[in-house]
Amino acid sequence: MRLGSRAVDVLYALAAAKGDVVSKEELLARVWPGVVVEENNLQVQVSLLRKALETSGESHLVTVPGRGYRLIGLDDGRQGLALPDKPSIAVLPFQNMSDEPGQDYFADGIVEDIITALCRIRWLFVIARNSSFTYKGRAVDVKQIGRELGVRYVLEGSVRKAAQRVRITAQLIDSTSSAHLWADHFDGSVENIFDLQDRMTESVVGAISRQLEQAEIERAKRKPTNSFDAYDYFLRGLASAHRMTRESTSEALKLFAKAVELDPDFATAYGAAAFCYVVRKINGWTSDRVQEMAESARFARLAAQLGKD
């Protein structure tokens, strides 16, 4: 099956996401830039892609309800949900460090207040209480939680209540690297518990918002490679890949190979090479289908591993 340019543009956008979800709005903006089109135009292209990417009755293009589309089945070594296309966080149940087990309700209430406050931040994707509270009382690795819930950031903490004093400790963690981005504690009296909860929640939300914004800014500033020559080969490879012919994709693969030879950690170049192999398969341009699909999977794994930040 030979795909039209629109379908190929959709495929390129999904492949570039390396398994992450791409929203319908983003696909419409990228495939039909500056043009207002009906959503069914996108659905037509997605349907064509599904058929083209079908293997043994199963398509590698799936719909994520309420979020968009993603490519799967490239064996990139990841499990669980893909990260959404905006900063995402799960607030885990805070541990009750008080002497009285009956104080769990207080710790749970603190967490609910934080979740409610975070949900007011439009640019932040917040996991619902029912989902995050499934981890209550369980010792689970933060990376696993991030994969299972599909979030980059995890907030965890504890509450200690003694006599008329309360201490709340919280820390913000990047689930992809287990790096601690922020930590603080809040002390107060329980004489006016609602004021204490409000003050603590506002402080935590303010700190989290600043940390998340800064973390996303730093991620956006990261260069794909420190080698200008590798980047030059990569750009030339992209230009060849966009011509979408058998010869141009072969040339693109050679250029991407030179790019990763100069910088073996160049994740984007590996991803682009994997995409070229997929295009060759769809259009029947492969000279050795089994070998090229194996290379596509290998490059996709490298792109996912090296570009996970």
Image (cartoon, rainbow, N blue to C red):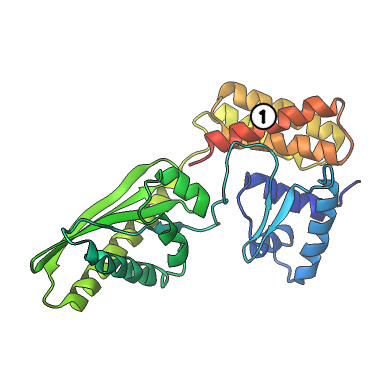
Check disc 1 and report the residue beneath it.
298
Front one among 204 and 148: 148
Q: Residue at x 31, y 66 (%)?
A: 108
> SS of the residue at dot 1?
helix
**Vertical position of residue 302 compared to residue 86: above or below:** above
* x then y, percent, for residue 9: 75, 51
Q: Residue furthest left?
A: 163
Q: On the rendered structure, is 24 left or right of 167?
A: right
* x then y, percent, for residue 265: 54, 28
Q: Residue at x 69, y 59 (%)?
A: 27
Q: On the rendered structure, is 72 left or right of 221?
A: right
Q: How many discs mark residues in the rendered view?
A: 1
Q: How packed is label 1: few (under 14 Cα within 10 Å), some, or many (20 or more)? A: some
Front one among 291 and 249: 291
* x then y, percent, for residue 143: 44, 43
Tell me which amino acid carries mark 1.
Arg
Q: Residue furthest front?
A: 101
* x then y, percent, for residue 246: 86, 34
**Quarter residue 129 falls in:** bottom left
